[in-house]
Amino acid sequence: MIKHLGTSLRITIVTVVLLGVIYPLGMTALAQVLFPYRANGSIVTRAGIPVGSEIVGQLWTSPKYFHGRPSAAGKNGYDPTQTGGTNLAPSSKKLIDATRSAIAELKKENPLATGPVPMDLVTSSGSGIDPDISPEGAYYQAARVAAARGIPVAQVDALIARSIVPRTFGFLGEPRVNVLSLNLALDDLRSLPGAPGR
């Protein structure tokens, strides 16, 4: 019995050191060398100041900006330290009521929008901090953004079209639009020659 306990203890120590110390440190070092931008959180900066992360959704409320998906992460949403979905079943009355309320609010915010309401704009993702919306979700908000900025809808639509990220490797996932990147591109419009100010 003592022999088996000694063997078990040695195996435990070796696996803890290998998998709990050496492997994580090795992967961290490798990621820092090969993919430093991704390894450090995909932080986006403007004039040297961090404005967000490409991979973490944030709350946008101004009509001049595209809004992301609703968030169920944390008490007030968009909390990257408490990621998670609502965990409510599709048959849940609470989820149905929340979705109906979100649809009404979305229509109120976007009175010029046409077409069906994109579901990603009224339901939270599994993480609660999804940084992307569907192209349909972006186009649905285009008229509001254009009106708030005093620019043609066609200009906003063209910006959305340029911002669409296709399926990964051509077959994984769905086409998407990164909300932070799109909003920063909107702000960059005013710096272009002949572009109207905000």
Image (cartoon, rainbow, N blue to C red):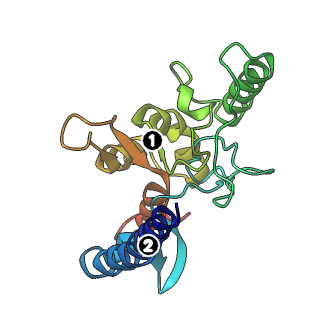
Question: Which amino acid, mark 2?
Answer: Arg
**How many residues crowd around disc 1 within 10 Å: few (fewer than 14), some, or many (20 or more)?**
some
Q: Is residue 79 above or below residue 89?
A: below
Q: Residue at x 43, y 59 (%)?
A: 181
Q: Give the farthest residue toward the left.
A: 170
Q: Give the farthest residue toward the bottom.
A: 48
- Which of label 1 and label 2 is nearer to you? 2
In the image, taking residue 36 as reference, residue 94 lies left or right, namely right
Q: Residue at x 45, y 61 (%)?
A: 54
Element under disc 2? helix
**Image x and y of residue 155, in percent:** 38, 48
In the image, taking residue 81 as reference, residue 119 lies left or right, namely left
**Image x and y of residue 59, in percent:** 66, 54
Q: Nearer the viewer, residue 125 or 70?
A: 125
**Image x and y of residue 111, in percent:** 65, 30
**Image x and y of residue 116, in percent:** 53, 18
Q: Residue at x 61, y 57 (%)?
A: 58
Label 2: which residue?
A: 10
Indicate the quadrant where residue 14 lies.
bottom left
Indicate the quadrant where residue 107 lies.
top right
Quarter of the C terminus within the rendering: bottom right
Alpha-carbon span between mark 1 and mark 2: 67 Å
Q: Nearer the viewer, residue 100 or 11?
A: 11
Q: Earlier in the sequence, mark 1 or mark 2?
A: 2
Question: Which amino acid, mark 1?
Answer: Val
**How many residues crowd around disc 2 within 10 Å: few (fewer than 14), some, or many (20 or more)?**
few
Element under disc 1? helix
Label 1: which residue?
A: 153
